[in-house]
Image: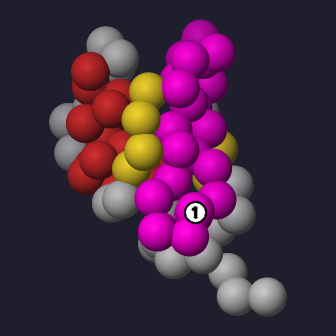
Amino acid sequence: MMVQVVVYPPAQDGGRRVRVGDRFVGMAYTLLDVAEFLEQAGLDIEDPEDVVAADWVEWRGGGPEVWLPRRP
């Protein structure tokens, strides 16, 4: 079973918190950042697009194409 990854909604600066399992691993500003955090956590990521297709990544507040906060 693959570890659960959660990418949270964008903050005001466009960064998205990334959690791997029960640990926050950093603030991502691009898909490449998310892929790097996952590699550092020991997951085998061949290409950043692998993160987009992974069913074990939960994108909250928008998918991998959303990097700006929603306007009220």
- Does residue 6 sit above or below 59 in this rendering? above
Question: Does 56 sit above or below residue 33?
Answer: above
- Residue 22 position within the rendered picture, expressed as x and y whole percent measured from the top left: 64, 15
Q: Nearer the viewer, residue 57 or 60?
A: 60
Q: Amino acid at mark 1?
A: Ala
Label 1 crowding class (10 Å Cα cut-off): few <14, some 14-19, many 20+? some
**Residue at position x 46%, y 69% from top?**
13
In the rendered view, would you say 36 is above or below 41? below
Q: What is the residue that sits farthest to the right in this orientation? A: 72
Relative side of 9 to 65, left or right: right
Q: Quadrant of residue 3?
A: top right
In the rendered image, the vertical position of residue 45 relative to residue 9, given as above or below: above
Task: Give the SS element for disc 1.
Answer: loop
**What segment is highlighted magenta in the picture?**
1-24
In this rendering, does residue 20 appear at all?
Answer: yes
Q: Is residue 12 left or right of residue 25?
A: right
Q: How is the image coloured?
A: secondary structure
Label 1: which residue?
Answer: 11
In this view of the protein, which residue sits in the foreground, 53 or 62?
62
